[in-house]
Image (cartoon, rainbow, N blue to C red):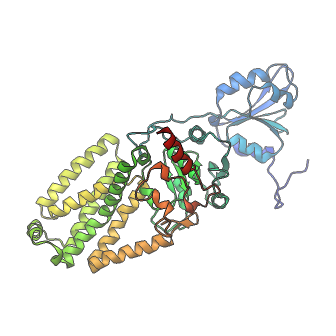
Amino acid sequence: MNKKTYEDGKEKPSLTDIFSQFKMSSDFIQYEEDTNQVKCWISYIRTLVDVQTLQQTILPVLKSDKWKTLEELKRGIPIENIIITIDTDVIREKLLDGFILISLSRYGLPSALIKATINKARDVSLPEVEFSVVGPKEAFVESIESNINLIRKRIISDKLRIVELKVGDLSSTKLAVLYIEGICDEQNVQTVIQRIEDIQFDQISDSSFISQIIADKTTSPFPQLLDTERPDRVSSILAEGKIGIIVDGSPHVLIGPTTLVEFFSAFDDYFYNWIAASFIRLIRLFAVSFSLLITPIYVAVLTYHYELIPSDLLGTLVSSRRGVPLPPILEAIFLELVIELLREAGARLPTKVGQTIGIVGGIVLGTASVEAGLTSNILLIFVALAALASFTTPIYAMGNTIRMLRFPYILFAQWLGLLGVVLCFCFMLAHLLMLTSLGRPFLEPIYPPRTIDMKDAFIRLPFSFMSKRPQQLRTKKTTRFSSIKSKKNKDIDE
């Protein structure tokens, strides 16, 4: 028999070649099964296959006298996903996916592939990163099928489209692109699929790999795709016209295109009254600004701008720095590094030990540094408040960015004072103006200014004001509901 070839002229591997590779691993099983009428060969990878499915469902049919051909075997086995093929590439792929191969001879074709994948995954649990007091308490898990199920339960529509892909030359990681047809812009969908198909990387372990590889600007410190562990958030954003990316083995789902303001919006903002939600969101934005700027402003004022300090406060500052041998820049960097060390140590240690290290270490080191005269107590308060304020960022990746940006601001403050802080802000703003997410402006609705999208940016207006989908998404269906009809119905009820 002539070997089949690919389009580029290379020969496809034979079944013998495939089995010789698999036999180098001790978990590959191949043996001959002597049934009542037909002898057949069974091949599978033991660590990927549910042995109970083989013993309780497949073997009883094999040992019966109800089949002589693979087609008859396919009709007799009560398993839905059975493939009969002569394509050796399909055979190799399915064996690695947990299928059992049955052939009438050791290296004979065609062969039957029967799905018997073992599913080991943790149960759906509470969100750990995006926990909320009110609202659903479900979080994504590492199984792509379970994650799609969590979204399917919330979007019961035949318009929900799922495009399955595989990435990674070694890992062959399963990946699903989700969007709602008739709402989502096809250009955004094609952009995502094309970038994923162009990935040249051998091993993909988590959705964060995808986020970094397909980002518009990989050298930017800002995340350009939003990651979440909440199914309710993903289903709501899909309804807006965005795209979700689920990676098998990752409990976080990527969402795009996204904007900067979305990283400071928690999904439980929509579970509160719009006034309370807007107040909490403004507090969160103020906390992020405070966390980013308070230490640089302290360095700038004490280095260059003593005249800006009120006279009543000047005496307190002078007394707090009496005996401190370090200049403000070294004092600030020392405390910031101590906070980062405590935070990183607390994150890497076991939960109970990590909490103890964070609390005890912060108190001991803070008190000792002040008593030793290395830092002032006022700066210690500012740094502690800045660290506390940084925890209000709902998305962990953006919180890391804010923590990192404090150090350039401190260096610019030491260089040019408050002018340096402003200059550093201008650099950051220019970078954000050039940044895009899947080709869409990252700073929208601030720039380009879009009044309609401001309804859910810095404050959250009532749902009756959210009849239009975001303009930047260029959705096919821009209207979510008729605000006029909604108002009329409300007036009739009243």
Is residue 462 placed above or below 219 in the rendered structure?
A: above
**151 left or right, relative to 181:** left
Q: Quadrant of residue 261?
A: bottom left
Q: Residue furthest right?
A: 1
**482 left or right, relative to 268:** right
Query: Which residue is drawn at the image coordinates 44% and 59% (left, top)?
Result: 457
Front residue of this view, candidates 285 and 78: 285
The percent coordinates of residue 66 (x first, y second) are 85, 20
**39 left or right, relative to 442:** right
The percent coordinates of residue 18 (x first, y second) are 75, 45
Q: Quadrant of residue 214?
A: bottom right
Q: Quadrant of residue 94?
A: top right
Query: Which residue is drawn at the image coordinates 32% and 71% (left, top)?
Result: 409
Front residue of this view, candidates 404 and 1: 404
The answer to whether residue 140 of the structure is visible from this angle is no
The percent coordinates of residue 19 (x first, y second) are 75, 42
The percent coordinates of residue 252 (x first, y second) are 51, 48
Query: Which residue is drawn at the image coordinates 79% and 44% (left, top)?
Result: 16
Q: Report the number of numbered marks.
A: 0
Front residue of this view, candidates 274 and 7: 274
The answer to whether residue 285 of the structure is visible from this angle is yes
Is residue 206 placed above or below 40 in the rendered structure?
A: below
Query: Which residue is drawn at the image coordinates 56% and 61% (left, top)?
Result: 471
